[in-house]
């Protein structure tokens, strides 16, 4: 969805939410029961759409020079269904459930602040981890040293290949890297059979998407450990692959 369309969705969602809230506060009791139920159901949907629109627009504020912040914003905006459900249930709680609970549970505000504090701590932990993860210099990564030894690449092609390697190591995206390495091996005179054999570890690599979805609900330290483990495995795979390509180029 284009940025312009996302902005339109956000504006319409805010207007829709405002109209529903005004109806609930002003004329709800004068409406038939069926319309009241429809309005109560539509209010969380509008809240979900607002959250979806806001999170989708976050990617426009990413800055490649601040990789940790860009990674965090990308993580927030990458799952529209999750963002919609967060807005849906948050709106349902604040607008429909909380008013009733407040009358029967005086300690509710303290419980809410405790929950918010835990959420802020979790976000802080994930942000700190992202900063450490992306602040390492290029000289500290073995696969970057290997790529400098690959021959017959122009400056622009080398930059694109390094970018594709970063996407694979950081996010597990292998498609673009496969394209660049295949082209490079073709220039080295490798046959199709040899290319398939050389790149077979990368071709066979499968990102554990189901595990990534489950990890969203895990504790921050569990997610940190899993992310480090997966990234280290991809680095080792890429190092081994580049060493093999280096040997082919020197033959």
Image (cartoon, rainbow, N blue to C red):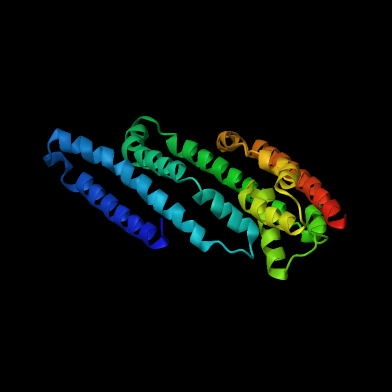
Horizontal arrangement in the rendering, residue 120 relative to residue 147 (left or right): left
Which quadrant holds residue 203?
A: top right
Residue visible at 69% across and 49% down in the picture = 169
- Residue 102's spot in the image, x, y percent? 36, 35
Is residue 186 depicted above or below 209 in this figure? below
Horizontal arrangement in the rendering, residue 242 relative to residue 180 (left or right): right
In which quadrant will I find the N terminus? bottom left
Which quadrant holds residue 64?
A: bottom right
Viewer-side residue, 237 vs 87: 237
Residue visible at 60% across and 57% down in the picture = 69
Residue visible at 80% across and 60% down in the picture = 150
Horizontal arrangement in the rendering, residue 152 relative to residue 104 (left or right): right
- Residue 51's spot in the image, x, y percent? 41, 49
In which quadrant will I find the C terminus? bottom right
Q: Spot the residue most to the right.
A: 251
Using the rendered image of the protein, determine whether residue 231 is visible from the camera's viewpoint. no
């Amino acid at each position: 969805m284009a940025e312009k369309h996302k902005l339109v969705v956000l504006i319409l969602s805010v207007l829709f939410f405002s109209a529903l809230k005004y109806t609930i506060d002003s004329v709800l009791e004068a409406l038939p029961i069926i319309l009241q139920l429809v309005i109560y159901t539509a209010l969380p949907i509008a809240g979900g759409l607002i959250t979806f629109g806001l999170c989708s627009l976050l990617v426009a504020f990413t800055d490649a020079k601040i990789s940790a912040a860009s990674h965090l914003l990308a993580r927030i905006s990458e799952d529209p269904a999750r963002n919609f459900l967060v807005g849906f249930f948050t709106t349902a709680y604040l607008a429909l459930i909380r008013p009733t609970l407040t009358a029967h549970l005086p300690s509710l505000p303290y419980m809410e602040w405790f929950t918010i504090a835990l959420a802020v701590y979790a976000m802080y932990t994930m942000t700190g981890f992202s900063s450490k993860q992306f602040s390492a210099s290029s000289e500290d990564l073995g696969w970057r040293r290997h790529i400098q030894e690959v021959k017959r690449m122009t400056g622009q092609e080398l930059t694109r290949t390094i970018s594709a390697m970063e996407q694979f190591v950081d996010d597990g995206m292998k498609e673009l890297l496969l394209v660049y390495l295949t082209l490079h091996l073709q220039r080295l005179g490798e046959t199709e059979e040899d290319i398939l054999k050389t790149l077979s570890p990368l071709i066979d690599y499968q990102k554990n998407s189901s595990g990534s979805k489950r990890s969203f609900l895990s504790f921050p330290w569990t997610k940190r450990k899993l992310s480090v483990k997966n990234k280290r495995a991809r680095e080792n795979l890429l190092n081994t692959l580049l060493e093999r390509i280096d040997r082919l180029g020197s033959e």
